[in-house]
Amino acid sequence: MNTAETADRQDVLLQVRDLRTQFRTPLGMLRAVDGVSFDLAAGETFGIVGESGSGKSVLVRTIMNLLPSNAHVPSSGKVLYRGQNVHTLSPLDAKHFWGPEMAMVFQDPMTALNPVKKVGEHLTESMRYHLKVSRKVAASRALSLMREVGIPEPERRLEQYPHELSGGMRQRVVIAMALACEPKLLIADEPTTALDVTVQRQILDLLVRLQADRDMAMILISHDLGVVSGVSDRVAVMYGGHFLEVADTRELFTHVHHPYTEALLRSMPRLELPTGVRLSAIAGRPPDMTAPPPGCRFAARCEYAQHDCEAAIPSLRPGPEPTHLFRCLFPLRIADDGSAVTTDPASDTQQVTA
Amino acid sequence: MAGIGTAHLRDADDRVLVRVENLVVEFPAKGGQKVQAVSDISFDILDGETLGMVGESGCGKSTTGRAMLQLPPPTSGSVRLDDVELTALSGDDLRKIRPKLQMIFQDPISSLNERRTVYDVVSEGLKIWDWPSADIPRRVSELLEAVGLDPQAVKDRYPRSFSGGQCQRICIARALVLDPKVVICDEPVSALDVSVQAQILNLLRDMRERYGVTLVFITHDLGVVKNISDRIIVMYLGRICEVATPDDLFATPAHPYTRLLMESVPRIETDGPDEERQALPPAELPSPMNPPSGCRFRTRCEFKQEICETTIPELVEVTPGHFTACHFPVLDDPIPLR
Ligand SMILES: Nc1ncnc2c1ncn2[C@@H]1O[C@H](COP(=O)(O)OP(=O)(O)O)[C@@H](O)[C@H]1O
Ligand SMILES: Nc1ncnc2c1ncn2[C@@H]1O[C@H](COP(=O)(O)OP(=O)(O)O)[C@@H](O)[C@H]1O
Ligand SMILES: [Mg+2]
Ligand SMILES: [Mg+2]
């Protein structure tokens, strides 16, 4: 089976198997997530990067079982949390699941905040519900959570309403809310995309620290390779509803095998590029997922594509490094003898993996 | 007035196309307060130059761009295009100068009228400016082709059938059709995916060469501003912190705010998460209604001294062509770009 399983990793928390999510739309069935498999170990941070529409948000919403009514998830796809199928939980069990087991942080903190409730109430409410703690205990834990997420003057802030806080402070509150019931898995979907770069840096630093302190697993989604690389142990590159490449962070960036990953890196106006260079844009646009092509989803935009690429979807297979998987018939940086070719820092590809 | 200085303005040789001096823009706010959006900034732009303007949201970039177009006219200060003082123009005179100054916005889809075809959108300016109607179709086709669209295939279509990147191409065609001198691009690639962003940056570069147009490029993205600009202004809370060429700015950033910005940009970390990283302390942006006295960045600055509170720092030249407004600039201490 084509999976990003990591069977040798102990303590698997989450297993996702051949997950597919489809939407009924006026233009036909849209295959938003189309065959995603991976394992997540306890305490691990898994980054998912991809352009808009590639299926990142729908994937994590499917994992969280938070889909709108026009969504269809074929039962062949599975999300197992400690062996338990998340999609067959009763509504009551599901309620006890979110919070103490999995929690989520979204791009716009206001979606998680009620404008007429004080910050403190947001924090104590779920603790009282899930952890059945007294008002007093909840209040003192709220205060320590506020400190943990680095909010200055936490006593005063607890008494404020969301609109009285800056965007960065709101996102800290939402993170504190997500942490309130000590989840084993935190899913963060573009948590810094709406924030300014200095605030983004603070939130990313915070997530890295919290994840390490609490030994919590994390799935971090971003459209920015820089953001995921600095936070993740392992990175998946998503395109057209599934993963095109998955590897440990260092391995991925030192031996980029998939042409799409390389093309993404080359199109970024990275600070380390010389001034005024012409960027390598990727021509064309992503596939229409109501009628995806039968072959590789990237073939139409790929400079290395051959005839065979259009016949069938390439399987997600390992290269020289067994945990480095890619979905490509003509991968980059694999020598004839099957060994990996490290990017030569002196060559032109320095721009890619320098 | 204790301004932040004009040392960085270039001698009034004939290559200076735009000169903005002591620009102030204030907006009325509740309780008789004022939003000090732009507080006494000056800069010039040479003919054909691309001026990058970078800083975080709320620092006054869009307000500056719009004030150059007199949308709305600034509270005080001067904006000169060639030898024309734009702030002194009104009514018809201002209208007549409009074609020379065009603007492109962040959200290409909503800046196009959904009921008008591509042809209508691009030809509108030509009709308003009384181009001979026989010449209009040819000019529209020329522009559409220049921005990488097939005129025959797109001219009768409506914006909603295009992607964000294609809509931005249409906006660029519309902005260039009247042969403007200056195009102010306000976050033109910020809403686009990185692969499309590269297409549009390359296109703007080509248009600059082909039509000799002068660009003001506003963005919050340091990588983008480094890539496209000839000269960069870094702004913070309505003031200029630093002015330099991209090479100088990013090799030896002198203002602590520029350095903070650079250090905040997420780079590709091939080694994965760095748990030892020194986390930045949370910092709040002061209110533009009540900005800090002296240096506006001082409330977040690690080098702050008493003088920073009492005296507004003026732009001074730290190395040739590199200016910074800081009492304690960081000299000759590069931030490694790896
Ligand atoms: N509720 C929905 N109904 C129909 N299509 C949807 C819905 N939600 C998402 N989609 C489509 O699913 C695809 C994947 O979307 P999404 O996961 O949000 O992308 P990403 O988060 O990677 O930008 C897109 O084509 C999007 O338009
Ligand atoms: N029309 C307006 N009325 C009141 N305040 C405004 C108006 N436009 C902008 N501002 C304020 O002026 C400051 C600068 O805004 P802006 O120029 O949009 O910044 P930037 O483009 O750098 O994000 C901000 O504090 C903003 O809230
Ligand atoms: Mg999304
Ligand atoms: Mg703006």
Image: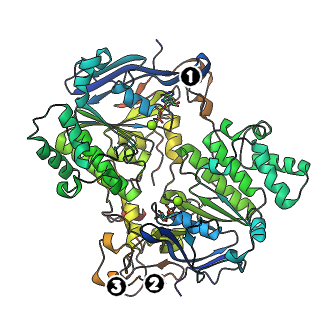
Left or right of B156 in this view: B31: right
Question: Could you say which disc has been placed on residue B29 in the image?
Answer: 1
Image coordinates for residue B280, horizontal then vertical, percent: 63, 45
Looking at the picture, tell me which residue is in the foreground, A124 or B258: A124
Left or right of B258 in this view: B125: left
Q: Image point 91% across, 53% down: which residue?
A: A134
Q: Residues within 10 Å of mark 1 (few under 14, many from 20)?
A: few
Identify the secondary structure beneath mark 3.
loop
**Tag 3–tag 1 contact (CB < 8 Å):** no
Give the labeled residue for mark 3.
A311
Measure the C-alpha gap from mark 3 to mark 1.
Answer: 62 Å
Q: From the viewer's perspective, is the residue at label 1 or at label 2 nearer? A: 1
Residue A348 sits in quarter: bottom left
Identify the subunit bearing mark 1: B
**Tag 1–tag 2 contact (CB < 8 Å):** no
Q: Residues within 10 Å of mark 2 (few under 14, many from 20)?
A: some
Question: Could you say which disc has been placed on residue A315 in the image?
Answer: 2
Identify the subunit bearing mark 3: A
Measure the C-alpha gap from mark 1 to mark 2.
Answer: 60 Å
Beta carbon at label 3 within 8 Å of ligand 1? no
Does A202 appear above or below B245? below
Identify the secondary structure beneath mark 1.
loop
Identify the amino acid type marked 3: Ala
Does A147 appear above or below B125? below
Image coordinates for residue A247, horizontal then vertical, percent: 52, 73
Q: Residue furthest top?
A: B1
Identify the amino acid type marked 2: Ser
Same subunit: marks 1 and 2: no
Identify the amino acid type marked 1: Ala
Identify the secondary structure beneath mark 2.
loop
Looking at the picture, tell me which residue is in the foreground, A353 or A2: A2
Q: From the viewer's perspective, is the residue at label 2 or at label 3 nearer? A: 3
